[in-house]
Image: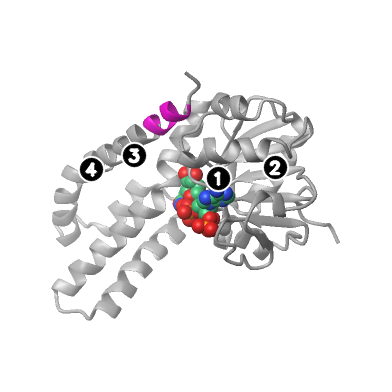
Amino acid sequence: MTSGPSLPVPTWFVGCGNMAGAMVAGWRMAGVDLSNAIAIRPSATPVEGVRTVPTISDAGRPPQLVVLGFKPQKLDEIAPQLRQFLTSKTIVVSILAGVEAASLRHRFPGVGSIVRAMPNLPVAIRRGVVALYSEDAGDALRQQLGDLFVSLGWAMWAADESKFAAIGAVAGAGPAYVARFISALAKAGERRGLSSRIAATIALETVLGTAWMAATTGEAMDDVARRVASPSGTTEAGLAVIDKALDDLIEVTIDAAARRGAELAEDARVP
Ligand SMILES: NC(=O)c1ccc[n+]([C@@H]2O[C@H](COP(=O)([O-])OP(=O)(O)OC[C@H]3O[C@@H](n4cnc5c(N)ncnc54)[C@H](OP(=O)(O)O)[C@@H]3O)[C@@H](O)[C@H]2O)c1
């Protein structure tokens, strides 16, 4: 029997809310050993499967791997407390949206490697998308972290930081946009007399079934749409409306998020 990927011992999750908690849940589901992982969060709200403490000084043995899982705005509060526990061997993995590798290196100058990861929420069920980026990780570390993140879904190393940001712009926030689309579909069902429960279920199953089918067959989305829409039929009438608006809407949506990402990057940049 081959063993799966493993977390360096010990691993600290500094901040373990929605996103880092989703990563922990995914790794737990993948059978990754979490017995030497520690979640640090002021509320000390328990994280299933992981010893949870309220402060960095309660965490014990210094970490080999630190996952930064707090909000970007907390970086300058937390980095000075954390720095003293890190060495030239420590790997820092940051999931902070927008905060660039150079800004992280400035806060953690002596650490071994700095890696940016941009996961999305479905990592909790091992169906996430994760972008990875590092300026200093060697091949062995790339392999080790790649194996860990692939166990959470689909993961790739980005060639440069702008590609990393592009993957994050689509995938990191993507589940929120997809959730809105599903609920818009459900509301349309409700307005046509379906109960909210039935409308929510058919909207969800329609999106799930379509994505699953395309993922299984590899069929392009244009072909999927073409197969649903017969010439001059009902779907074609609907597509004539959505096609006018949807691409532009998604573009301005992702632009707005990217602008906010640029602001966060600017705030964290060294003057
Ligand atoms: N949510 C997403 O889909 C998503 C996707 C990609 C990247 N991200 C990134 O993930 C990071 C966290 O986002 P989130 O959505 O998970 O936020 P969240 O649920 O609010 O989690 C933030 C975590 O930081 C902890 N924290 C606050 N102050 C702290 C301190 N002084 N020391 C240590 N921990 C502290 C919080 O502790 P308590 O639990 O005790 O409050 C909480 O566990 C952000 O940088 C975000 O950019 C999020």
Q: Nearer the viewer, residue 237 or 169?
A: 169
How far apart, in angstroms, are the residues tagged by discs 3 and 4? Answer: 13 Å
Residue 53 image-quadrant placement: bottom right
Disc 2, SS: helix
Contact between marks 2 and 4 (CB within 8 A): the answer is no
Q: Position of residue 203 (x, y in %)?
A: 31, 68
The disc at residue 130 is 1
Residue mark closest to the camera, 3 vs 4? 3
Task: Tell me which label, 2 or 3, sits earlier in the chain.
Answer: 2
User: Looking at the picture, does residue 184 appear above or below residue 87?
Assistant: below
Q: Position of residue 165 (x, y in %)?
A: 46, 33
User: Looking at the picture, does residue 75 appear above or below residue 30?
Assistant: above
Task: Tell me which label, 2 or 1, sits earlier in the chain.
Answer: 1
State the residue at coordinates (58%, 30%): 104
User: Looking at the picture, does residue 268 appear above or below residue 208?
Assistant: above
> Range of the magenta residues?
262-268
Disc 4, SS: helix
Q: Is residue 82 left or right of residue 261?
A: right
Q: Please tell me whether residue 104 belongs to the stretch shown in magenta.
A: no
Task: Tell me which label, 1 or 3, sits earlier in the chain.
Answer: 1
The disc at residue 253 is none
Q: Which residue is mark 4?
A: 249
How far apart, in angstroms, are the residues tagged by discs 1 and 3? Answer: 18 Å
Q: Nearer the viewer, residue 79 or 123?
A: 79
Q: Please tell me whether residue 263 belongs to the stretch shown in magenta.
A: yes
What amino acid is found at the position of numbered circle 4 in the picture? Leu
State the residue at coordinates (26%, 74%): 199
Task: Tell me which label, 3 or 4, sits earlier in the chain.
Answer: 4
